[in-house]
Amino acid sequence: MTDTPPTTPPTTPESAEPQVIAFGRPPVRTDAGRPRVLAIANQKGGVGKTTTAINLGTALAAIGEHVLIVDLDPQGNASTGLGIERKARRTSTYDVMIGQAPMRDAVIPTAVPQLHIAPSTMDLSGLELEIGQQKDRAYRLRTALGDINKGTPAFDFTYVLVDCPPSLNLITVNAMAAADSILVPLQCEFFALEGLSQLLKTVEEVKKTLNPTLSIHGIVLTMYDSRNNLSNQVVADVRQFMGRKVYDTVIPRNVRISEAPSYGKPVLVYDLKCVGSEAYLRLATEIIQREKELKAG
Ligand SMILES: Nc1ncnc2c1ncn2[C@@H]1O[C@H](COP(=O)(O)OP(=O)(O)OP(=O)(O)O)[C@@H](O)[C@H]1O
Ligand SMILES: [Mg+2]
């Protein structure tokens, strides 16, 4: 670890060793009134990160939690999937990350009670250029979330879910530096485990340099197809490799899940009784149970 800014931003090319360069200590935070922050991360594209952010967020809200989804992907799929039109994104996570606005200014309600979102726009893709040389560049999200439950309006979020882009770049590093825990969606397909070791290495690096208390909350297997032998093999392999870190709940491939975003709705609103909705409700219950076990030590 060094104390001088690097000459290049800390981008992590997916093929190279992760290089997370930390400066100083993490901003101090107290746990009183602070939400649990879960980063939903996997540098692989299309594995179900956004689908999990939207539907786990909705399921947690449905069982009584107060949830904020932070859309940290320039694609803005979580925002679109929750029906937030572009013109409604007056303050975005980009404004927050470059220090132009407090997080509370970006927070807007969704159609789901107790579920809010801080939306993103394409501007976020320029973040690295904008803040890559700043000393506190890896802690922007952590700082922005620090006082989310203080001030006016009076938010009382119990969970923050951060939807990450498909990359191990500065945005994802910010999410990991801000998070208590990481939730990793893995698609039930042949290359499921490919890239996982790279992700785990990055988590270790972030732990060492930016966020010593970071943990892996769990791995959620997505797009499971029971008629497909390969799906079953992937579930067996991932459980063997990652053991108890893998949630019992497996999210099935379900057409209702994939249809819902085009209506700007979570699947639980689009079709509460479908197998996809039931699975995300089970996942939410399992996550809360894991949280209780963690708290009990
Ligand atoms: N369980 C599921 N059943 C059917 N389709 C699904 C399921 N989960 C996700 N999908 C579909 O798969 C595609 C990729 O999902 P999603 O956008 O959530 O992945 P992602 O990891 O966020 O992608 P990106 O890396 O681009 O951000 C989407 O079209 C989504 O609707
Ligand atoms: Mg996504």
Image (tube, rainbow, N blue to C red):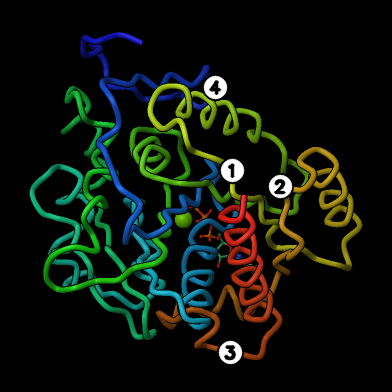
Residue at disc 4, secondary structure: loop
Q: Residue at x 57, y 26 (%)?
A: 201
Q: Residue furthest left?
A: 100
**CB within 8 Å, label 3 to label 2:** no
Residue at disc 2, secondary structure: helix
Along the line of sight, the residue nearer the viewer: 266 or 34:
34
Q: CA distance from mark 1 to mark 2?
A: 8 Å
Along the line of sight, the residue nearer the viewer: 121 or 186:
186
**Mark 2 packing: few (<14 Cα in 10 Å), some, or many (20+)?**
some
Q: Mark 1 highlights which residue?
A: 216
Q: Mark 4 highlights which residue?
A: 15
Q: Mark 3 highlights which residue?
A: 271
Placement of 245 over or under 82, stated as above or below: above
Q: Mark 2 highlights which residue?
A: 245
| Left or right position of 155 against 38 | left
**CB within 8 Å, label 4 to label 2:** no
Marks 3 and 4, the one that precedes in the sequence = 4
Q: CA distance from mark 3 to mark 2?
A: 29 Å
- The amino acid beneath tag 3 is Asp
**CB within 8 Å, label 1 to label 2:** yes
**Place of residue 62 in the rendered image (x, y in percent of width and height, measured from the top left):** 50, 83
Marks 3 and 1, the one that precedes in the sequence = 1
Q: CA distance from mark 3 to mark 4?
A: 40 Å
Q: CA distance from mark 4 to mark 2?
A: 25 Å
* Quarter of image, ligand 1: bottom right
Residue at disc 1, secondary structure: strand
Marks 1 and 2, the one that precedes in the sequence = 1
